[in-house]
Image (cartoon, rainbow, N blue to C red):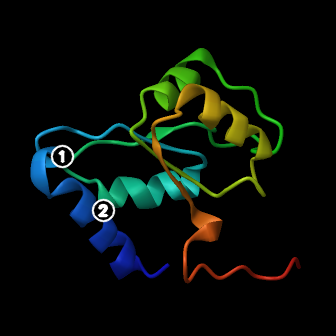
Amino acid sequence: MSRTLFHLCFAAMFLTGPAYADRPQVAVDIAPVHSLVAQVMDGIAAPDLIIQPGATPHEYSLRPSEAAALQSADIVFWIGPDLTPWLAEAIETLAPTAALTPLLDVDGAIQLEFR
């Protein structure tokens, strides 16, 4: 997804109607996604990182603080079940009402062949 489209989506979500008054609770799965979302949300709120840097996202056990961040999330940005299949169940259980954005499924996402 282009950077401009990403910024426009965030602006539309956070600058319209009553959502502007409330600070959204956002959770992201891995550090690179956290960096992107944090830049877009600069000055609004800070996203919560679920999988800490250095940890493997393939087999991960949530800490209580990470589960709490996921549970309070209004929006979850994650790569998708191809990278973190276990997170799908955690999201379904802990954040059933959160808006989900699996980034591999976003129109325009380019997936490179395995190298």
Label 1: state its secondary structure: helix
Label 2: state its secondary structure: helix
Task: Give the residue type at disc 2.
Answer: Phe
Q: Nearer the viewer, mark 1 or mark 2?
A: 1
Q: CA distance from mark 1 to mark 2?
A: 11 Å
Measured along the vertical axis of the image, is residue 4 above or below residue 82? below
Measured along the vertical axis of the image, is residue 68 above or below residue 60? above
The dot on residue 10 is 2
Residue drawn at 58 percent across, 36 percent down: 50
Which residue reaches farthest front? 97
| Left or right: 75, with 81 as reference point | left
Q: Residues within 10 Å of mark 1 (few under 14, many from 20)?
A: few
Residue drawn at 67 percent across, 25 percent down: 62
| Left or right: 21, with 39 as reference point | left
| Foreground pick, 30 / 98 | 98
| Left or right: 39, with 79 as reference point | left
Quadrant of the image containing the C terminus:
bottom right
Residue drawn at 52 percent across, 32 percent down: 95
Which residue reaches farthest right? 115
Residue drawn at 74 percent across, 53 percent down: 81
For disc 1, the marked residue is 19
Q: Earlier in the sequence, mark 1 or mark 2?
A: 2
Residue 107, position in %: x, y? 55, 79
Q: Residues within 10 Å of mark 2 (few under 14, many from 20)?
A: few
| Left or right: 18, with 73 as reference point | left
Residue 48, position in %: x, y? 45, 37
